[in-house]
């Protein structure tokens, strides 16, 4: 169970998205999940083993690392991607529920097949489910970006941190491995995240506009 | 050549979470709605998070465990004393044990299908279309299947709670400490040992326990839902139940030689009318939910 399995689940749910939703899914998987897996994970791979403090005192490096990196960037991004992908499954569950409900009324074989393959128009309760899923996506994206910003005081990774936790004997200099590369990737992932947020907001605006222009009668289908 | 050893099956690639997922999601068809939500929570918020995130946090738990001594062997002994079993292994075991009761339901459904197929074959209606229909038939959660399903949910709850309790016994505080003091042989005296990434580990421990709690709640909700549905059916007398489903349910509870006898002696239709007249029928139906 890993990223490819999640991808198959989401692609299945994608059938009922708008075009912006499909673009969002591609941006998510190509610019975020793939970059995370093939590039970012190797940049952060030696984050603890190469975190060096100017002291021989055993335990000082562990403690200083823990103080400055409560949660690693990689883990935050993994959790962000998992949480951001899940609202789409809300839509998939609703569609499955609708198909199940409609199945009870139709009994012929051929109609059951077309039922599974049909694409429901985004109106009525499906519109609300879809809009809720977009709102949740925005909340999770924004929430995680804010958490990253707060925990690391911005998106830049410093080269040097000064630490005086016990058992470090006094104020020690600790050096972070690959700070520039980490800054570049942090900025890249933050940009991709913002693009996804912009796409989600555009999709929400599009849905609202569609609902308004098709009139109130379209809502009661 | 006949003497060449058979190719070893590629077990490495078969025994992983992916194939486990394939096995368990087959059970999905016969679950209730809540059961499907529970299954998604298990796979996305527990197994996926475990594989992509938690395993790398605990990856260097032993190499990053440093003791303030140069005495060889002290590191290993102290690590072993404070971490008898790693969180990751406990979670993996918990996930495997919690997911497997669902296979009870799958086995029961397979057994029912097998019986139905046999009945149809003996009644002479074994065309491929009928057999296909049996394979794709979705069973109502009533009768013996209801009991199997309930038992599987109860086991799920028991395993989840048991593991939460074991977690509490081994690691009484859900917070991971930064420092442990250790004085087992061969450490020369009481040594300070430092754990790697304690804060990150605390965050993930709390997350996994929270999702565990959510799963227990989902299972309890499912129990309540099933009991409610059964009571509802009992009170209404379930007249809407289709006759065909009823026949297959009744017939599948007979033993094999009785099936032979009744098909040999009567037609299916006359057997149905005979039992309908029996006075205990309605009470029997109710007790089997």
Image (cartoon, grey):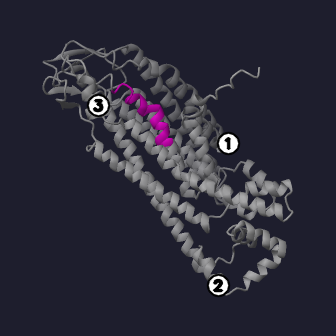
Report in which chain the residue with disc 1 lies.
A
Q: Decide whether residue B59 is among the magenta residues.
A: yes
To which residue does mark 1 refer?
A: A15
Helix, strand or loop for disc 2: loop
Inter-mark Cα distance, 2 to 3: 64 Å
Helix, strand or loop for disc 3: helix
Residue B218, percent from left and from top: 47, 56
Q: Is residue A104 left or right of residue B267?
A: left
Q: Nearer the viewer, mark 2 or mark 1?
A: 2
Residue at the image position 25 percent from the left and 27 percent from the top: B77
The quadrant of the rendering that contains the C terminus of chain A is: bottom right
Helix, strand or loop for disc 1: helix
Residue A124 visible in rendering: no
- Quarter occupied by residue A67: top left
Q: Nearer the viewer, mark 3 or mark 1?
A: 3
Magenta residues: mostly which secondary structure?
Answer: helix
Residue B82, percent from left and from top: 26, 34
The quadrant of the rendering that contains the N terminus of chain A is: top right
To which residue does mark 2 refer?
A: B280
Q: Is residue A117 left or right of residue B205?
A: right
Q: Earlier in the sequence, mark 2 or mark 3?
A: 3
Residue B207, percent from left and from top: 38, 42
Of residue B58 and residue A135, the one placed in the foreground of this image is B58
To which residue does mark 3 refer?
A: B80
Q: Residues within 10 Å of mark 3 (few under 14, many from 20)?
A: few
Residue at the image position 35 percent from the left and 14 percent from the top: A177
């Amino acid at each position: 169970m890993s990223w490819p399995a999640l991808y198959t689940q989401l692609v299945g749910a994608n059938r009922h998205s708008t075009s912006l939703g499909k673009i969002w899914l591609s941006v998510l998987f190509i610019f975020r999940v793939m970059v995370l897996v093939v590039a970012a994970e190797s940049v952060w791979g030696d984050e603890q083993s190469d975190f060096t403090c100017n002291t021989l005192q055993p335990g000082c490096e562990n403690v200083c690392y823990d103080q400055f990196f409560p949660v690693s960037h990689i883990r935050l991004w993994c959790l962000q991607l998992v949480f951001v992908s899940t609202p789409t499954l809300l839509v998939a569950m609703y569609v499955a529920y609708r198909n199940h409900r409609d199945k009870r009324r139709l009994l012929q074989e051929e109609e059951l097949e077309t039922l599974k393959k049909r694409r429901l128009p985004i109106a009525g309760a499906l519109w609300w489910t879809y809009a809720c899923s977009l709102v949740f996506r925005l909340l999770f994206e924004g929430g995680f970006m804010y958490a990253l910003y707060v925990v690391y005081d911005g998106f830049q990774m410093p080269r040097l941190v000064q630490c005086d936790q016990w058992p470090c004997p006094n104020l020690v200099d600790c050096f972070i491995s690959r700070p520039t590369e980490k800054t570049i990737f942090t900025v890249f992932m933050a940009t991709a995240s913002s693009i996804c947020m912009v796409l989600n907001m555009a999709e929400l605006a599009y849905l609202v506009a569609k609902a308004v222009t098709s009139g109130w009668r379209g809502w009661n289908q | 050549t006949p003497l060449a050893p058979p190719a070893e099956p590629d077990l490495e690639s078969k025994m992983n979470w992916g194939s486990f997922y394939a096995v368990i999601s087959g059970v999905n068809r016969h679950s209730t709605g809540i059961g499907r939500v529970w299954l998604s929570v298990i796979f996305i918020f527990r197994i996926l998070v475990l594989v992509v995130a938690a395993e790398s946090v605990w990856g260097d738990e032993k190499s990053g465990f440093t003791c303030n001594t140069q005495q060889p062997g002290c590191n290993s002994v102290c690590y072993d004393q404070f971490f008898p079993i790693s969180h990751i292994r406990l979670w993996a075991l918990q996930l495997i044990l919690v997911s497997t009761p669902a296979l009870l339901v799958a086995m029961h459904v397979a057994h029912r299908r097998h019986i139905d197929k046999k009945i149809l074959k003996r009644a002479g209606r074994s065309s491929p279309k009928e057999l296909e229909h049996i394979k794709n038939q979705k069973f109502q959660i009533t009768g013996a299947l209801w009991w199997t399903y309930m038992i599987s949910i109860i086991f799920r709850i028991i395993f989840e709670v048991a593991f939460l309790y074991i977690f509490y016994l081994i690691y009484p505080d859900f917070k991971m400490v930064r420092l442990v003091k250790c004085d087992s042989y061969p450490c020369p005296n009481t040594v300070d040992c430092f754990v790697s990434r304690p804060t990150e580990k605390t965050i993930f421990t709390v997350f996994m326990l929270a999702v565990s709690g959510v799963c227990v709640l989902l299972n309890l909700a499912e129990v309540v839902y099933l009991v409610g549905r059964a009571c509802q059916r009992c009170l209404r007398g379930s007249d809407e139940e289709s006759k065909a489903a009823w026949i297959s349910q009744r017939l599948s509870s007979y033993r094999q030689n009785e099936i032979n006898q009744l098909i040999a002696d009567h037609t299916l239709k006359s057997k149905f009318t005979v039992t309908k007249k029996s006075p205990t029928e309605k009470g029997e139906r109710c007790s089997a939910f």
